[in-house]
Structures are given as structure tokens and as C-alpha cells.
Amino acid sequence: MSDAQLTARSLEHLLGAWRTAGASYQALADRIRLLVLDGRIPIDTRLPAERDLAAKLELSRTTVAAAYRQLREAGFIDSVRGSGSVARLPGPALSLPAVAGEGMLDFTKASLPAASSLPAAARAAAEELPRFLPDPGYDPVGLPHLRAEIAARYASRGLPTTPDQILVTVGAQQAIALIARTFLGRGDRVVIEVPTYPHAIEAIRLAGARLVPITVTAPESGPHRIGDESDGWDVEAIEQTFRRANPALAYLIPDFHNPTGATMSPETRERVLAAAAGHGAIVVADETTAELDIDRVGEFLPLPAYADSASAGAPVIMIGSASKTLWGGLRIGWIRAERSHIQRLIAAKPATDLGTPMIEQLVVARMIPQLPEIMEERREQLRLGRENVRRLVAETFPDWTMPVQHGGLTAWVGIGAPVSSALALAARSHGLLIAAGPRFGIDGAFERFLRIPITYTPDEYDRAFAALTRAWAVAANEPVPYFDSGALPSVV
């Protein structure tokens, strides 16, 4: 039996606005099933007792029992007398999203296809590999010449960096988890934006930290340029949060925020750093989307605002990744920090990882000098995707709102009604996997939002919006249909 247990109060928060015009037991079963499918209820988590949940939701115990029975029959929970009900996925369906079903379109992934220069870089890297074969091959820090290329990239953006300030990781997700495990203790408070990248939430929670949310909103319609006061962050509220919570760390996505697309102004950055410095907090700046600009060419924010503590006043750790700019299959990320912090991270890394794949490092080292040309290619791909989403939203759902965004990989679309989870669930039966808004929060909020990637082809968008049109009729007006699905999507 799992040690993880969900209280009735916690499940109530996750459920959000779950009630529909149909039978309560059906609506409750549908929502719990979606929470399991998209990972908000982890597998092996013990659900609240029927009596406790019924009391919290002000339902009859018969209603809750009927919902649990339907989930049990579909394989989404196991129940043992005296031991409670545990979240499961149906039988052999513990498969990856990529094999969730033939013809399924997976919009839980916000990622671009491989850069066109990658095949040539991979061939050259394979030819280069033999000179490294006499070595053991375990590389916990990163190849020296790759670290030098990453450091040079920071320097070209205005932040002098040496290779010993870089630690190469297996993707940005490992970087987030490693930072959390190294610098956080159980019960430490962490300032985190909401909405935000859901796997960062998971990594910080696994470190035993307590989340302290600050709100980020998508830019409103109309012109929005770097330096605007309305950048999406309420600075006064952030400063109050630091004073009240006295956090150990703040995890932020300052450029092309995932999922809203917002970008911090220089003034906001300075005030956030000052607030962090006043309370001895580390600022973690996740820059995995920072270079994915569409419109702000030549307007890239200078990095000294996120420099070392000597000038910024607070320790700053930056996270970067090749997966967003080059290809998701290149699992290479990195951390840029003060030397003392890098040394602590190097010491902690072997507990979960003994080395970063060698050939992938060789590929990325060859491609980093090509980033200016690669980003031009990416800019055109993202611009096309953004315009396709904007057009289809306007034509298909004129009441929905798509915010202004100048870069990034996603659109944080307002759908006008608190039915995002119901819409995502209904879309599955029409061949579309898409992440509901609450997947990016910590308490079941954001039911009025849907994250739509801007990284797909025109044909894929036509298929996706056809599925959303059919699903919307169900989610907005009728009880959500019951169906079997076993894929557990991981949001990227």
C-alpha cells in the first residue's frame, strides 16, 4: 500500500468546479479520472475514504460510492476492504503518451521538430566520438568544450561567464530537481509562479518544500513591449510575499513564461532580486524558453539583471536547455551559477546520476555556435504556429481570448467558462490529448484556461480544433461522456 494519501480537503481543491448538469456520481468519477490521467493524482496515491469525501463535498455517501465503483470497474482505482482506494491506470495501458492510441494527436507536448542542422551535427559528433572512447565515459560535470561554448553564449548576451560556472545536466528537468534537492530542506518555503511549469512543482514538492504562489497573468490585447508596467507580475504583491513567507528560494520563468507567454520587465527583475536579497533567498531563473523570440529581435533583455550576487544582491542560478531550441530528443540542459554553488551541485549530482550522455553533448557543442541561424528558423516556425492558433481561435471560438505573446512555445487561451478539465477529458474521445489549465496550478485553479502549443503544423491544428469543437459541445453543455483511456501524459 502506498504511503501517499490524499485528504478529502486536498481532493476538493483538485476537483475544482467539477459539477455538471448530469448525475453527480458520473461527474465526480469523470473528474477524478482526468486528475489521474494528467498526473495531478499520482499513481498509487490513496484516495479519501467515501465517508470523508462525501462529507467534504456535501454529497451522500451513496453518490461517492457510485463514483468510486465506476472508477474501480474501469481500472482507475483499486479498493481493498480496510485499506482504502488507491489510484491506478487500467492494466496494460501504463504506456507512454506517444503510444496512447493510433491517430491520437498529442498537444500536451509544446516542442518543435528537430532543427534542420541537427542531422549534420549528429554525423560529425559520431565521427568525433572515437577519441573519447579510451576514457571511462562517465561525465558528471560536462565536457570542457561544451561548458566553454555555453559560457561563451552567456558572455555574448552580456553576462561574462567562465566554464567552471557551468554544470551540464540531463535536460532542464534534472537541473530543477538537482537544485531543489541541493538547496532546499523539508519545510522550506519556495516562491513559485502560478500558473507555471508543472514538473517544476513536482520536483520542488519532492524536495519537501512548501509552495508559496505568486500570480502571473498573460498580456492583455494590444501592444506589449519589454518595459511595459503591465508585464504580468504584480511586483508589490511579490515583495509582500517575500516579507511574509521569508522563502529559501524562488523559482521563476522570466522570459516567455510557460504557459502565459509573459516576459518580466527590467524593473520587475530588479525589484524581485532586491526582495530576494533582503531575505537571503536564492533566485532560480528558468531560461529554457528565453531565446524563443518571435517579435523582439534585437530587444533581448540584457542578463546583468540576473547576474551573480555581487551585483544582483541575491544568489542567482540560471537553467538552460537544448531541448526547447534544438530538439526534445537532445536531453542536454545546464546550470549557470556561482562557483561555490556549482561545486555543491556537482557533489550532490551522483546520488541520482553518474554522467551525462557523451554523444549528445558532442552534438550540442557543435550546434551552440549555430544558434543565431537556428533561432531564425525557429522564429519562422513559431510565427506560423502562433498565427494558425490565433486564426483558428478567432474563427472557431470567437468568445475565447488569445493573449498577445512575442515568443515562447504556448498560448494561454482564455476559454470563458470553468470547463477546461471537462474539455480536456472530452477531447480525448475525439483523438486529442491536451493539458487542462489546472495542470499548471497548485490548487485546482485555472479552469477558465487552456494551454495550446504554437509548435505544430497547419494540418495538425485543423485536426486539433475540429476535435476541440466536438469536445466543446460536450464540455460546455452536456455531461462528460465516460470512456476508457490509459495514457498518462507528461506535460512539456
Image: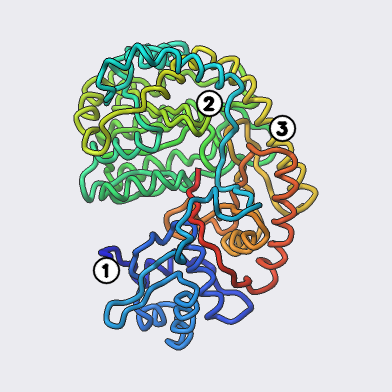
Q: Position of residue 283 (x, y in %)?
A: 34, 33
> How many residues crowd around disc 1 within 10 Å: few (fewer than 14), some, or many (20 or more)?
few
- Residue at 56 percent across and 68 percent down: it is 484
Which residue in the structure is indicated by mark 2? 326
N-term-proximal mark, 3 vs 1: 1
> How many residues crowd around disc 2 within 10 Å: few (fewer than 14), some, or many (20 or more)?
many
Q: Is residue 209 above or below residue 367?
A: below
Quarter of the rendering containing residue 170: top left
- Residue at 65 percent across and 37 percent down: it is 404
- Rounded to the nearest angstrom, the CA distance separating label 1 from label 2 is 42 Å
User: So how many labels did they put on this image?
Assistant: 3
Q: Amino acid at mark 2?
A: Leu
Element carrying mark 1: loop
Which residue in the structure is indicated by mark 1? 1
Q: Position of residue 317 (x, y in %)?
A: 33, 28
Find out whether the residues at labels 3 and 2 contact each other: C-beta distance under 8 Å. no
Q: Amino acid at mark 3?
A: Leu
Nearest to the observer: residue 159 or residue 3 = 3
Q: Position of residue 461 (x, y in %)?
A: 71, 44
Q: Amino acid at mark 1?
A: Met
Find out whether the residues at labels 1 and 2 contact each other: C-beta distance under 8 Å. no
N-term-proximal mark, 1 vs 2: 1
Left/right placement of residue 414 relative to residue 175 reads right
- Residue at 34 percent across and 50 percent down: it is 211
- Rounded to the nearest angstrom, the CA distance separating label 3 from label 1 is 49 Å
Quarter of the rendering containing residue 252: top left
